[in-house]
Amino acid sequence: MAFLTRRWPWTLLVAALAIAVAYLPPQRPEEPDPYRGEWQSYPTPEARLAKRLGDDYNRMADRQHVLKVRDSLMKVLSSRPTRTATVTGLSPRRALDSITQVIAIAATPPVSTLNPEVRSSIAFVPAAPALWDATYNVYLPTATDGRTCLATHPVDATGNRRPESLRARRELGPCAFFAAFGLPGREIQRWLAARNYNFAMDPDWQLPRHTPPPADELNAIQWLQFALARTGLGPRPEFFYELEGGSLYWYSFTGSACAADERVACRYFFFSTPPAPDLRRNGTPVPGVIDFLPWSSSQQYGALATLVRDQGPDRFAKFWRSSLPPEQAFNQAFTVPFDQWAPAWTRAAYGAVRIDVRTRTREIASTLLWIGLCVGACVGLALTRRVA
């Protein structure tokens, strides 16, 4: 009996720890390191050296492919007369000329007159099906002749499949801003280049942005799987990250702090250089060439499009071409100061974020309920064993 009396407090402690674990933020699985995470596959120094040399070769091959495509497209553009203030389409086969022109017209930025300073083109590049996801690139003017912006899209080299435009307004990517507003100011260009143009990936400023649909309600079995996965006692179900995808834990810490009206965090979130590590890893090995997937989605991609829609093309052009640093250019060009706009935009993108030391009533009630159930179970077990 004394053993049971000494045992149930430990059971209560374990239950309390399980409750605490349930309140911890979920953790993403760590990405494997290309070298340290593959010691078993490359156990010897010679094998690891060969792996590094192979990676270097692949990077150089990618660089040469990107440069080859750029030089080929620039040669085509130089051989045919192109009108300024238009978006042109380039296709590798005559059979694709019509659909290329349709997509180019649909992707033309919705402004009264395009800027004649930069010519923009959508080019379909033949690629093997295995390379379709790797050849969506945008060649900014800094990577071409200083006044040409190219958005390349892979197309089936065999001609068996025709290209399909998923989101026509996004086909130009950052090139749409160059086509509509010309070359950016030096400080604006430096700021966007440091962030891999992530704020300018989605140029569709014609339609208002919609909030993501709410997640479906869980049934009893899914709720139990989800609860066990949160506590670490069970495997993560397939829908785990889909449900947690809208959680602020997956967002930038500075972005979440900005949504909570922290002005210093807003400045860091929008104007920090160098950018976050995930932005430094993205992109091609050629300066001025960035990876671009029209169907990809991120709240940050539409930040500049939101400014065009809310403030108008004229005010945005003043900001885009300003020679001032980004925050000063923002306050000078727009009717809303940055300190007021940034938290509002972040809350609209991420949702309201509450950062304080207060605990809500339902959280206290839930914790007390679980503690009471654990205490009751332990006391009931001790009393049952005592009577027996």
Image (cartoon, rainbow, N blue to C red):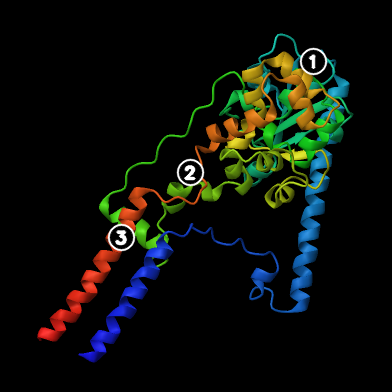
The residue shown at (49%, 27%) is 210
Residue 269, image x, y percentages = 68, 42
Instruction: For the residues labelled 1 and 3, say whether their Cβ atoms are less than 8 Å apart.
Output: no
- Residue 115 disc label: 1
Q: Work out whether mark 1 precedes mark 3 in sequence or the reverse, and give the earlier one.
A: 1
Residue 271, image x, y percentages = 74, 39
The secondary element bearing badge 1 is classed as loop
Q: How many marks?
A: 3
Q: Is residue 107 visible?
A: no
Q: Is residue 86 visible?
A: yes
In-image side of 159 versus 235 (left or right)? right
Residue 152, image x, y percentages = 72, 33
Q: Tell which tag, 2 or 1, sits nearer the viewer.
A: 2
The Cα atoms of the two marked residues, 2 and 1, are separated by 38 Å
**Crowd rating for badge 2 (residues with CA inside 10 Å; few <14, some 14–19, many 20+):** some
Q: Quadrant of residue 39?
A: bottom right
**Crowd rating for badge 1 (residues with CA inside 10 Å; few <14, some 14–19, many 20+):** some
- Residue 267 disc label: none
The secondary element bearing badge 2 is classed as loop
The Cα atoms of the two marked residues, 1 and 3, are separated by 64 Å
The secondary element bearing badge 3 is classed as helix
Q: Which residue is at the front of the view, 182 or 359?
A: 359
Name the residue that disc number 2 marks.
Answer: 246
Name the residue that disc number 3 marks.
Answer: 368
Q: Quadrant of residue 76?
A: top right
In the rendered image, the residue lying farthest to the left is: 387
In-image side of 154 versus 351 (left or right)? right
Q: Quadrant of residue 229?
A: bottom left
The Cα atoms of the two marked residues, 2 and 3, are separated by 28 Å
Q: Is residue 215 above or below residue 89?
A: below
